[in-house]
């Protein structure tokens, strides 16, 4: 590497949200950079940044609206130079980055599945008729309403501890979280079972961490190139192109998952009416190098089947 490595006097500043999951992801990124470059922990500084999504805790995220609820303030800090790299849950990342920023480093992807969390019920399929389940995720709510119209859905937000308390208080008999987050928090025990992707197709990019930087920062680019996971990058290229063509925002229930099979990519997608009254699913296969075209093509095929106003029917 031709650029000077970070040192305790000139550390690489890692920007992150302050939630326990975000901090775990920032530490994983730092640890991978330390190992890849033989650097001490003191060559890095973790800088916690509060985002709109962290500030507003009393309303469902979909009511706050807008893209980048968890990312804007962090990207602003990259652009103004107060941090050097930013660690993001790719599930929360808008499909396009602001001018001047680059996003081309992905850590190896975690478990992509959703976790079924319940004190008494073992699996999603075991939920009794009419059971009350908690979720504030538009995608999970629409998928549940579509497959299990008998269930009663209540809003559920908050960290793992808050949600477990709500379940203990009997507010709902089950809730849903990403397996990836639980695993990264060392709380795999919270998942009663993992839901097969055939039963609940995950959100685009679920389980993936991306590391963003200034486009012109050669030191950060060289440091990050060493920890980039190629297969995750290929899968996300397909999934994010699919999302971009669907114009996905927090307002639309969209699921999508790409798997690599040798040199081939297998992309599955599902879009739903917000009230779960209708779902349109499809898949695509092709060379992994053409993932972006594959994602765009699948999105167009799904959209072509969607009647006008498909995304408008709010429950
Ligand atoms: N929208 C919040 C969010 N963003 C990323 C994760 C989990 C970790 C991941 O998918 O990488 C979560 C929480 C959840 O869905 O349980």
Image: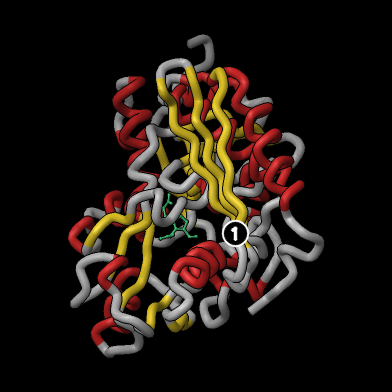
Within the image, what quadrant is residue 311 found in? bottom right
Query: In the rendered view, would you say 312 is above or below 114?
Result: below
Query: In the rendered view, would you say 95 is above or below 132?
Result: above
Instruction: Identify which residue is drawn at 65% across, 61% down.
Output: 252
Q: Residue furthest right?
A: 308
Q: Is 310 left, or right, of 264 in this rendering?
A: right
216 and 267: which one is in front? 267
Callout 1 crowding tier (Cα within 10 Å): few <14, some 14–19, many ≥20: some
Q: Is residue 10 visible?
A: no
Give residue 6's position: percent from left, percent from top. Answer: 44, 27
Quarter of the image that includes the C terminus: bottom right
Give residue 164's position: percent from left, percent from top. Answer: 28, 76
Instruction: Identify which residue is drawn at 46% across, 48% down.
Output: 206
Q: Is 186 left, or right, of 271 in this rendering?
A: left
Q: Is 95 left, or right, of 231 in this rendering?
A: right
Give residue 29's position: percent from left, percent from top. Answer: 39, 37
Q: Classify the position of ligand 1 by quadrant: top left, top right, bottom left or bottom right.
A: bottom left
Instruction: Identify which residue is drawn at 58% across, 49% down.
Output: 281
173 and 207: which one is in front? 173
Query: In the rendered view, would you say 169 is above or below 288?
Result: below
Instruction: Identify which residue is drawn at 41% across, 77% down.
Output: 134
Label 1, secondary structure: give it: strand
Q: In the rendered view, how is the structure colored?
A: secondary structure
Give residue 124's position: percent from left, percent from top. Answer: 31, 66
Q: Is residue 278 visible?
A: yes
Q: Residue furthest top?
A: 2
Q: Which residue is mark 1?
A: 279
């Amino acid at each position: 590497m031709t650029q000077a490595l970070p040192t305790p006097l000139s550390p690489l500043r890692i920007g992150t949200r302050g939630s326990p999951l975000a901090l775990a992801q920032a530490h994983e990124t730092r640890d991978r950079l330390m190992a890849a470059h033989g650097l001490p922990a003191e060559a890095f500084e973790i800088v916690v940044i509060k985002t709109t999504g962290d500030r507003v805790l009393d309303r469902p995220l979909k009511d706050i609206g807008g893209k980048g609820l968890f990312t804007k303030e962090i990207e602003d800090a990259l652009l103004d130079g107060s941090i050097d790299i930013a660690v993001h849950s790719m599930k929360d990342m808008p499909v396009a980055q602001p001018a001047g920023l680059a996003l081309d480093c992905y850590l190896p992807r975690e478990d992509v599945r959703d976790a079924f969390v319940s004190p008494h019920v073992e699996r999603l399929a075991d939920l009794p008729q009419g059971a009350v389940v908690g979720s504030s995720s538009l995608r999970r709510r629409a998928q549940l309403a579509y497959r299990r119209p008998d269930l009663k859905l209540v809003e559920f937000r908050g960290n793992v501890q808050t949600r477990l308390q709500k379940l203990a208080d009997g507010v709902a008999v089950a809730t849903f979280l990403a397996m990836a987050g639980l695993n990264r928090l060392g709380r795999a025990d919270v998942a009663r079972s993992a839901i097969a992707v055939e039963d609940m197709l995950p959100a685009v990019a679920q389980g993936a961490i991306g590391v963003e930087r200034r486009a012109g920062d050669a030191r950060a680019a060289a440091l990050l190139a060493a920890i980039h996971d190629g297969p995750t990058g290929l899968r996300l290229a397909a999934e994010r192109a699919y999302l971009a063509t669907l114009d996905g925002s927090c307002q639309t229930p969209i699921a999508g998952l790409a798997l690599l099979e040798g040199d081939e990519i297998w992309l599955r997608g599902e879009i739903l009416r917000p009230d779960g009254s209708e779902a349109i699913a499809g898949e695509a296969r092709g060379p992994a190098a053409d993932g972006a075209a594959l994602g765009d093509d699948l999105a167009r095929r799904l959209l072509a089947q969607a009647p006008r106003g498909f995304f408008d029917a709010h429950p």
